[in-house]
Image: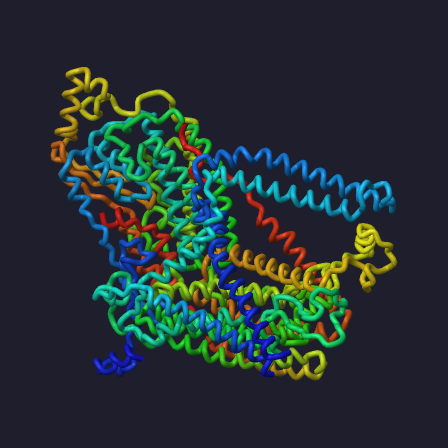
Amino acid sequence: MFAVYLPVFIMLGVATLVAVGMFTATSLAGPKNMTAEKAIPYESGSETTGANHIRMSIKFYLTAILFVVFDIEAVFLYPWAAMFRSLGWVGFVEMLLFIVILGVTLIYAWKKGALEWES
Amino acid sequence: MEPADDILLDDDAALELPAEPMRLNMGPSHPAMHGTIRMVLDLDGETVQNVDVQPGYLHRGFEKSCERGTWAQVFPYTDRLNYVSPMCNNVGYALAVEKLLDIQVPIRAQYYRVMLAEIARICDHFTCNGAAAMELGAFTPFLWILKVREWLWHILEAETGARMTHSFARIGGMAAEPTPGFKAAVRARIPEVRKVIAETETMLIKNRIFLDRTQGVGILTKERAIALGCTGVIGRASGIPYDVRKDNPYLVYGDLDFEVPIGQDGDNWDRFSVRFEEVHQSLRILEQCLEKMPDEGPVSVSDPRITLPPKSEVYNTIEGTIAHFKLIMEGLKPPKGEVYSFTEAGNGELGFFIVSDGSGTPYRIRVRPPCWFNLQAVREMVMGDMIADIIPTFGSINMIGGECDR
Amino acid sequence: MTTGLLLLTTALKILFILLVTVGAFAPMLVWAERRQSAMMQDRIGPHRAGIRLPAGAADAFRASVLPMRLAAAASGAVGALLLLLLAFAWAADDASWLPVSPLELTATGVGLLVLGGILDVGSKIHGMLADNGGNISLAGLLHPLADALKFIFKEDFVPPKADKLLHSLAPIITLMPAIAVFAVIPFSDVLYLEHWDAVVPRNGVVTGDVTAIPLQVANLNVGVLFLFAIAGTGIIGAAIGGYASDNKYSLIGGIRAASQMVSYEVALGLTIVPCFMIYDSLRLEAMATWQHDNGVWGICVLPITIAFVLFFTAAIGETKRIPFDLPEGESELVGGYLTEYSGMKFGMFFMSEFIEVVGLAAVATVIFFGGWDLPFVYRDGIDFPGVWDAQLASFVMGVEYNGAVEGIDATGIALAHWGVLALGVVGFLAKIVALIWFQLLTRWSLPRFRYDQMMQLCWKGLLPAALGNILFTGVVVLLGEGAMQMAVWSGTFVVVGSIVFFFLPALKRDPRVPAGAQPAAS
């Protein structure tokens, strides 16, 4: 266990080190010359009106909810898929029911308009 | 959340759920707005609820500037109207003054003007269609198309001496005869241009993403197009069969065989394909002109009150010197009166309304820029579409700041 | 395995991965991307930038082209003649009339052929240099380096009203997972340390006291889960970068990035499930081994062929490149979530994008293209169908062919363990390059989606198709061997057919005169 996961943590450490190193390099080496004009948020050369943090359309949050539903489905499918051959037809039918239920969920969301982004 | 906290502390109203949508400035300093347009958008998520289109960032006082010099000194200003197809503007203005003078330029000059104007029109349409592809992210067709424009600009440069600001037309003719290699160069390029169009079409016209992005987007109905005064490609894509070259032929367009493509839905796709079809028609016109244009003959009227004498006469004869002096210092003097002359430029009907008080200086020059009227339609086109649809829709208008703001 | 050896090998493997990804592929990708796009677009790309050689160099290069070409032709001809002699001798099964031994003859012939090839390539390079006015244009490879240096010395701008912590964290969170995904990617077969210069048997079973070092940083039994968990972390970077920038373009871009990437994350995870069902494992190393042992690349099994198309689409969506670059969408959102980033922080976003391209190619290689597996290469050497290669080898070596070569149970040409592994690494890298190139072609050919179209493609296209493909795979697998055989045949048919009928014709282009090469009027 240790021998398998230690390299992963070393890799994560090295990756973080590379990222932080680049970040530090540009923070230290780059000049800093802040002016009042530069501090204005860029909005095509016009003064910005209203708050820059604004409540976004509910559609975006619906996407997040759908993501949770289907990502958990994916997580359930992974171990099933890896054990698939040994589970045989029984496992297949069980998972068929699961996928069908989720398919119905998708169709329901579809019909309810959760998958319409135009309007 | 520093910023959000600031707002909460500073402004009690921000504690309420913000009812109004996000107000976003697009332009003038924005990649898709050419630096000449500002759009103030009210966005609900990605959807455009309201838009305010604000032109005027390239206003240079063209019409007022024209009242300062002689009639001939207006040409450099017209180059800077639609700077993508300046030859069309050159020819349009020359025709207006000639209408006031009531003269006809020689037949060779007429063909020469038609050819240069059609080359300019191809450049104009290509720039617009290429930019439409680029703004949707397809960079490769854009550069193929720019390559063609480069070929054509080489031809124009060889003829006029400048790539964009030609100032090549003159009242009563053209500044110089066609170069000896002109016809050969045009003839050599026509098949190559067709080849590039075919290649570009395979990249875009069969591309599902491109079709989805353009079809049914930015629709302008025929009625609204007429009401807003849209002409040119915008009008034709909406189904108005109006082309000045066909309906009110000037120069030799009446003798030439070409068709006017018409769109059905008035969406971005129609504008795109009408432009490509017009390029094909322009190539047809060029081929006919190559056949019909005489190789010999004057390219200017031989009236010393209108046309500058050749340099050899200016330096060697007293008459030539005086004619040159009078034309340069006082300018030609059209009769008192006013006239409206209109031609088909790259974007539609380009009209010049000119008033003469009989002096060597224009009393008033008023331009009817096609872009100005076409731009009015943008608001209706993008309302209710998504933020990403603004870019191709605005691009398909081919708004040229120099012409729109003048 | 001792802890010391574990640490040493891990360090070496990580070093290799960093060299390949950060050191070689990401900069080369920048260069290749520019060069490829310039070629597609008929324009002068940055690859023309070069180091100017002294005056007269161009003439010298041009003068050397013809002699080199002649020498190449002569060398190649003699080499081919020698090999032809060998072929005659082999056909007659009589080496006695040859002036030298078959081994020497082969060595000389192959050597001359290789020399001819090198000379030919050299003459072409000299010709290109001469055309280029004596400039070494390959120095365009240094452009990414110059870019990186420039990025570091650019102003480090943080908007005053931005959330400083999140704004700084975003590029780190983006870059870190992009590199970390390589932890589970096997770049060759298992290395048996004690047998490194021996020939291991074809089934890979070595007896005795051996130290097995997998040529991947960590052979996790949940490899794919790790992959998606880490890759999913990258979403956060773009999203909080956009949110923390105090800019409306950034905000829209960040929110687009978040919703796009979570959507495609789901699709990505589901498209790949059929592969686990067929490979019977979540280990990436086991997937490559399955493909090697069964002698068929995953892409040639019909359910996986479908999965590949879906996976690749979803994965390009996950890397946020054209046609899915809506979060950046430079024509509408100026820079999207990157708008308020400058210097190397901006560079880190871009670097992670390039590394993601490499990572995607690596993952796709392992899962769909057999990883380090090469046709006709086995753990004990190279073996073509039939026994002619073993006979030829024994003829060249001057030993009697008796059903085996050098006492090994093989019908082909035996190769030492390290040689097979090295071939595997080379094959793996070559496949990655090919897949990267395919991504470049896509990126420079397609326009960008609109937000709703992109979301619909994911939720109404990829997702139901992936679910359907899972059920289809289940049926195929459970129906047994016959159905699998059918799947392999039909999958191979689809792959070969699409290459022959769609991909190759699309690559064909007429050579054209570059813009501005001729004066318009003469």
Q: Nearer the viewer, residue C338 or B389?
A: C338
User: Left of C325 or right of it: where is B305?
Assistant: left
> Is the N terminus of chain B in the top left, top right, bottom left or bottom right quadrant?
bottom left
Q: Nearer the viewer, residue B123 or C98?
A: C98
Q: Evaluate whether residue C259 shows in this view.
A: no
Q: How many marks?
A: 0
Residue C435 image position (x, y, % from top left)? 57, 59
Quarter occupied by residue C10: bottom right
With respect to residue A65, does B140 lie above or below? above
User: Left of B378 or right of it: where is B269?
Assistant: right
Q: Nearer the viewer, residue C427 or C446?
A: C427
Residue B369 image position (x, y, % from top left)? 26, 46
Q: Evaluate whether residue C417 shows in this view.
A: yes
Residue B390 image position (x, y, % from top left)? 36, 60
Residue found 42% across the figure and 40% down from its top: B259
Q: Nearer the viewer, residue B6 or B28?
A: B6
